[in-house]
Image: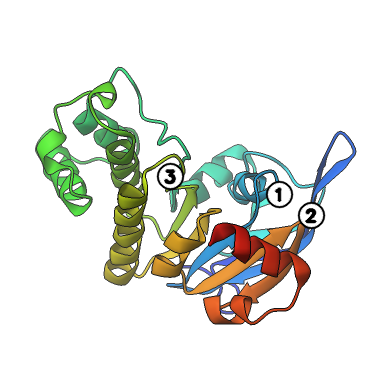
Amino acid sequence: MQDSVDGHPIVVKALRKSFSGRTVLNGIDLQVETGETVALLGRSGTGKSVFLKLLIGLQLPDSGSIRLCGREIPALGLNQLNEVRMRVGFLFQQAALYDSLTVEENVAFPLERHTKLTAVERERRVKELLASVGMQQDLKKMPSQISGGMQKRVGLARALALDPEILLFDEPTSGLDPITASEIAQLIRALKERRRLTAIVVTHDIHSARTFADRLVLMHDGNIVIEGTIESLQNSRDEFVVRFLGEAA
């Protein structure tokens, strides 16, 4: 059962982070409801990926609160943090597959480390996960033998291996051609509808965000400029919002 704060499994308040005197996040407030998919939009270098790293404790904030599944992330010790991380799936920007392992072995890796499944049960689970992302025919291939889009599908299967309550995506369509990017966006939407996962998707690809996001959040200069539906963004007269949508068109 998912722990949350007032029905919100992700609650961020007054989050601040700077590097070498440069402010990256300037007091961010964000709440994500159970089953909601939020697209975190913005230009490159606006702190979107830093935000994800802070959420799962890969970096520490300068100040502010981060609560995942009811736990205050910056206050946790490593063992407690790892317990929370097992409830969170993370799809890295470059898929981050292990080059020396096959597709099948990559997806099996978290199952071997964190579950007591037998070899037969693991094999069945891996095949189910790969089938859910359309990669069941390629389980014996090495990452170098499949395309970037296929690698992201495998990375997603691995992120789902421990049946997480929360999914975090870092630029899932970056570097992909438009057709493949659209396929990944449709896959995220299908998983959302099937599993009712809570998700944050960091992206600059507003076309894909339209496909899967319940809510769009646009960041600029370390602040949230606007959040809401695509229609609310399109109706905004804020100079940056208008410019961002125009450049993304």
How many numbered discs?
3
Proximity of marks 2 and 1: CB atoms separated by less than 8 Å = yes
Residue 46 image label = 1
Mark 1 residue element:
loop
Residue 35 image label = none
Query: What is the distance, in whole Å, between disc 2 and disc 3 at their CAs?
Result: 25 Å
Residue 59: x and y, percent?
A: 68, 40
The residue pinned by badge 3 equals 91
Residue 30: x and y, percent?
A: 66, 68
**Colour mode of the rendering:** rainbow
Does 32 sit left or right of 76 as displayed?
left
Front residue of 67/35: it is: 35
| Front disc: 2 or 3 | 2
Residue 75: x and y, percent?
A: 71, 49
Proximity of marks 2 and 3: CB atoms separated by less than 8 Å = no
The amino acid on which the numbered mark 1 sits, given as a three-letter code, is: Thr
Does 101 sit left or right of 224 as displayed?
left
* Residue at the image position 33 percent from the left and 20 percent from the top: 99
The residue pinned by badge 2 equals 221
Count neighbours of disc 2 (C-alpha within 10 A) and say few if under 14, some if 14 to 19, many if 20 or more: some
Vertical comparison of 27 with 129: above or below: below
Q: Earlier in the sequence, mark 2 or mark 1?
A: 1
Q: Earlier in the sequence, mark 2 or mark 3?
A: 3
* Residue at the image position 57 percent from the left and 45 percent from the top: 81
The amino acid on which the numbered mark 2 sits, given as a three-letter code, is: Asp
Proximity of marks 3 and 1: CB atoms separated by less than 8 Å = no
Q: Earlier in the sequence, mark 3 or mark 1?
A: 1
Mark 3 residue element:
strand
